[in-house]
Amino acid sequence: MPENTELQIGDKAPLFTLKTQTGQEISLSKIIGQKPVVLIFYPGDMTPGCTIQLCNIRDEWSKFEQLDAQVFGVNHADADSHQRFSAKFRFPFPLLIDPDKKIAKKYGAVKKLFSATVIKRTVVAIDKNGKIIFHKHGMPKNADILKALSKK
């Protein structure tokens, strides 16, 4: 698989297993078949843009719950950083730790910044069958994510 895959709508979502800020192991393979998933790849905990993006999801959480979506924030920060970020802003969804950005790369959510590889703000929605139904860089509107999730 190339270094930074650009996934297309309809592609099979790359499987992964990552830990949350509390140490719980999350495997996409165990969620597929049960509920849709939203992955929010974001560059950094406690940064202005990332805080706004994740708080926007939090503020419309009931809409994601109505669609039975499992939402995860994803970046390379450690458990302590994720715990502080989640506690401060009371996120109702887990934050996943992708320490070497391997999962972000599989989802096309990294970019080069000078000599460093950083996470590129990206939102991916996966249907119950494990297919990509939404893939946007930047900070898409919740309404657009919810619209993709609500299509049967």
Image (cartoon, rainbow, N blue to C red):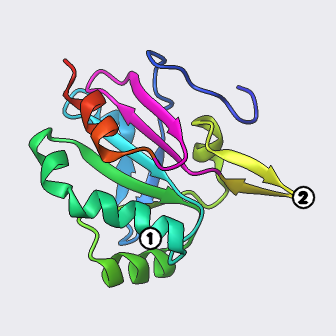
Q: Are marks 2 and 1 in contact (CB under 8 Å)?
A: no
Q: In the image, is 142 to the left or to the right of 150?
A: right
**Vertical placement of 109 versus 48: above or below?**
above
| Residue 28 visible in the displayed image | yes
Q: Quadrant of residue 22?
A: bottom left
Q: Amino acid at mark 2?
A: Ser
Q: Residue 9 in the image: state x and y as whole percent.
A: 46, 19
Expressed as whole percent of the image width and height from the top left, the position of residue 61 reads: 19, 56
Give the vertical position of 5 relative to 79 (above or below): above
Q: What residue lies at 75% left-to-right and 28% top-to-bottom?
A: 2
Q: Which mark is residue 51?
A: 1
Instruction: Work out which quarter of the rendered image holds the N terminus and state it.
Output: top right
Q: Dot 1 lies on which element? A: helix
- Residue 31, how many percent across, how many down? 27, 37
Taking the spot 53% from the left edge, 58% from the top edge, the residue there is: 42
Disc 2 residue crowd, few under 14, some 14–19, many 20+, Cα 10 Å: few
Q: Is residue 62 above or below residue 82?
A: above
Q: Amino acid at mark 1?
A: Thr
Magenta range is 120-139
Q: Is residue 96 above or below residue 104?
A: below
Image quadrant for the C terminus?
A: top left
- Answer with left or right where residue 31 lies relative to residue 132: left
The residue positioned 25% from the left and 37% from the top of the image is: 146
Q: Which sits earlier in the primary sequence, circle 2 or circle 1?
A: 1
**Residue located 49% across and 17% down the image:** 11
Q: Position of residue 151 (x, y in %)?
A: 22, 21
Q: Quadrant of residue 128?
A: top left
Tag 2 residue: 115
